[in-house]
Amino acid sequence: MSVGVINNALMQDLNHIVGIGNVITGPRALDVYSQADGRGADLIRVMPRTTEEVAAVVNVAREHGQKVFSVRGKIFPETLDGKVGILIDPVNLNEIKKIDARNLMAHIGAGVTFEQLEEELNKQDLCLLMPGSAESPYVVRSYLERDTLVGSVSFRQPNLSVFHAILPNGSKWMSGTQQLTEDGANFREDQGPQLSPLFGGSEDIYGIPTFGIVYVYPIKTERQVFAYSFKKIEDAVSFTYRVSRNEHCFEIAGGDNTWWSSVAGKSLDLANWTVLMSIEQHKALVDNQAAQVAGLAKDLGAKALGKDMVAELGQTLRRPWYLLDRAVKGRIEAVKYYTFADKVPALLDTASSVMKGMEVGKGFIPVYFGSSFFCECDIHHAEEDMVKAQDMRLKAYAKVLEQRALIDRGNGKLAEMVYKKANPVTVSMVKNIKKMLDPDNLLNPGQLMEGI
């Protein structure tokens, strides 16, 4: 049978499953990505509307001998360059099935965006935690990948209770208590060995997420926003750590002028290091905590920013911070990692030391009562400096890895760098589980790293 006949049969099957308007071929198939910069792939992009359609696409791909890839972020991944196959785009898996106000959970498809869910939650005086450096607009994807959350001071990650994913054999994986029954409680089950935690950061090599139950939160009666300027990063980090440790905030993040300007989408002309935070609770408690925070800031020599600037910065809260939106020069490369509070200043200096001649933004966000800090160095560059910036990014990652920073996500060259320093048993485990679930290497081959 000729290649043309095979392709025609494949297209007919895909059109039958998802509808003619939801199958895209040619260069437009990659329109879902930014920063491709000369890279390419021969992919058929399909946009299923249900979990069942995702399963059907996977089964058809297997029948036609096609590999299946999935859209995991808006930045074109280096590992996708030159690939051939089917690309599953979750954009149409955008149904908000249920908002459970009593149990503070939202049941949503993998294509529901932060903006879409927030709009519906506002109608019920609810909110969700927003990511501080997201590469995908989709809530389930962001939470499953453990994106750092600006309001995660007193909440553990992932902010996801249960998820569903389509496995390479076309069957549906259900995590948590739904492994026992889909009726009744929908809670994450953390006891005993299970495969569900492996899906986060896996680049979908085990399965493609289609649905999730995420945690949501009530909007409190009183909310106040504060911003303080510090001369030294050490004082800014100390303030952020102590405020988080004492649970005197809901959202909190710190950074330099370049970082905050990119988050706000305009030049702010901030001096030194700025920490932005919010407090939400009953008014009496907010006032009490605000007084304690002001006293701590004064002890550390901080200056409270004026009302206009606080209002300007405050507008960035309660909305997702997307990495691509921060590309003030058109392109951005980010170095992201976790470390302890006392290592934040030194590691930010270490990462930025290889970025000479570039505009660099530095930011930090505490996680779970300040037990660790998410840190980020952004390289802002023009398109012609792409290769240089990407090289600097990898060199910066190598530097912070030497200083024992935690890098919990990555693919391609970065993943190889991280796994090289990991226990060999870890790599063997990843390979063995992949082989067990996907013996034909159907789903996202090579998307975590070469050979996996």
Image (spheres, rainbow, N blue to C red):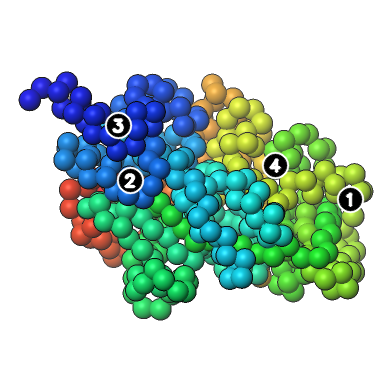
Residue 94 sits above or below residue 368 on the image? above
Question: What whole-number distance in Å separates the C-alpha atoms at marks 1 and 4?
Answer: 17 Å
- Callout 2 touching callout 3 (CB < 8 Å): no
Question: What whole-number distance in Å separates the C-alpha atoms at marks 2 and 3?
Answer: 13 Å
Residue 54 is labelled as: 2
Q: Earlier in the sequence, mark 1 or mark 4?
A: 4
Residue 329 sits above or below residue 231 on the image? above
Q: Which residue is mark 3?
A: 15
**Considering depth in this image, is 185 or 220 the residue closer to the camera?**
185
Q: Earlier in the sequence, mark 4 or mark 3?
A: 3
Q: Amino acid at mark 4?
A: Val
Question: What whole-number distance in Å separates the C-alpha atoms at marks 2 and 4?
Answer: 35 Å
Residue 8 sits above or below residue 267 on the image? above
Q: Which residue is mark 4?
A: 263
Q: Amino acid at mark 1?
A: Leu
Q: What is the secondary structure assignment of the residue under circle 1?
A: loop
Query: Callout 2 environment at 10 Å: few (<14), some (14 to 19), or many (20+)?
Result: many
Q: Residue furthest bottom?
A: 191
**Considering depth in this image, is 338 or 167 the residue closer to the camera?**
167
Q: Nearer the viewer, mark 4 or mark 3?
A: 3
- Callout 2 touching callout 1 (CB < 8 Å): no
Q: Earlier in the sequence, mark 2 or mark 3?
A: 3
Q: Amino acid at mark 3?
A: Asn
